[in-house]
Amino acid sequence: MLEAIMNRRSVRAYTNAPVPDEMVQDILESGRWAPSGSNIQPWLFCVVKDGTRLKNIAAFSPGMMSVPPLAIIICTDKELAFERAGAFGRDELSVMDASMAAENMMIAATALGLGICVLKSFNADGIARILKTPEHIRPEFILTVGFPEKNPPAPKKKALADIVFKSETITRVPISPNPFALAATEGMPKSLPRQPEKPRTTAQTPKPIKETVTTMGISK
Ligand SMILES: Cc1cc2nc3c(=O)[nH]c(=O)nc-3n(C[C@H](O)[C@H](O)[C@H](O)COP(=O)(O)O)c2cc1C
């Protein structure tokens, strides 16, 4: 599993070979099993194989570097997300859910020997028109899928030591110095004094989700 996670690259050039249906099925299945806030599962996966439609999608997607043999558009049902979790569900949870599904699909595709890339740089209204989706179904991500023409080298990833913090003190200074952190913390103390936690007033105590949803006048 770790191997597929680490081998996944954003592949932007594909051969013309079609993606076998069983592989597409496995990718979709892996998206279906992604975690989902309040288990709303507001996602819809639209598979596009038709060459003309793919070209039209590419025309509305500046972030798409070449026309792939297949695209999966991850959409979310904003009406369902709002019904179940209000504006937070519609504006935040649904996008997070789509991201979770996208990552599952990318790992699955990599494990199957396919190349895949997630895109956000596209005109969502244009894509919705091409897919003929109703108003409340919004395209969140496009996944381009195919057999890689070439496997790109791994881009530079930050070292763990530069992004993991000592949780017992929660300082803003990383364990080992890195250029970004040094620039951001220049002139700052090496560790920030921990603020004593103020007791929460009743008004600040988070309400259980069910209560919040009821307050918004939503029955579910
Ligand atoms: C939210 C998000 C949006 C992205 N949008 C695009 C895009 O529009 N076009 C593109 O070519 N790559 C896109 N990428 C891929 C990133 O450029 C890529 O993940 C990054 O350069 C790291 O490379 P790696 O995926 O090979 O590790 C996106 C990635 C994420 C997570």
Image (tube, rainbow, N blue to C red):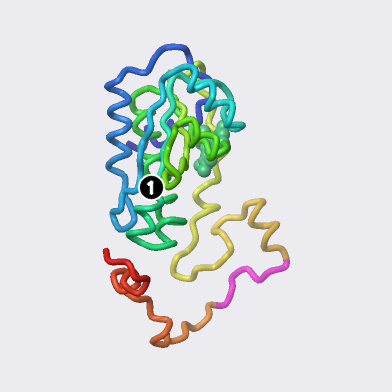
Kind of element beneath mark 1 = strand
Residue at 32% x, 36% y: name it: 1
Q: Which residue is mark 1?
A: 77
Q: Is residue 24 magenta?
A: no
Q: Is mark 1 within 8 Å of ligand 1?
A: no
Q: Is residue 188 magenta?
A: yes
Quadrant position of ligand 1: top right
The front one of 170 and 62 is 62
Going by the numbered disc 1, the residue's amino acid type is Asp
Split into 4 quadrants, where in the image is the C terminus? bottom left
The front one of 53 and 1 is 53
**How far across and how far down the image is residue 195, in percent?**
53, 80
Residue at 37% x, 55% y: name it: 81
The front one of 78 and 208 is 78
Mark 1 burial class by Cα count in 10 Å: few <14, some 14-19, many 20+: many
- Write down the quadrant of residue 75 in the picture: top left
Above or below, 171 against 101 in this view is below
Residue at 37% x, 76% y: name it: 206
Above or below, 102 against 136 in this view is above
Relative to residue 113, is residue 117 drawn left or right?
A: right
Report the residue that reaches farthest toward the top.
16
- Write down the quadrant of residue 90 in the picture: bottom left
**How far across and how far down the image is residue 174, in percent?**
56, 59
Q: Where are the magenta residues, as a range?
A: 187-193
**How far across and how far down the image is residue 129, in percent?**
50, 34
How many discs mark residues in the rendered view? Answer: 1
Relative to residue 38, is residue 103 drawn left or right?
A: right
Report the residue that reaches farthest toward the right.
187
Task: Label the magenta part by its dominant secondary structure.
Answer: loop
- Write down the quadrant of residue 99 in the picture: top left
Residue at 32% x, 59% y: name it: 84
**How far across and how far down the image is residue 140, in percent?**
47, 42
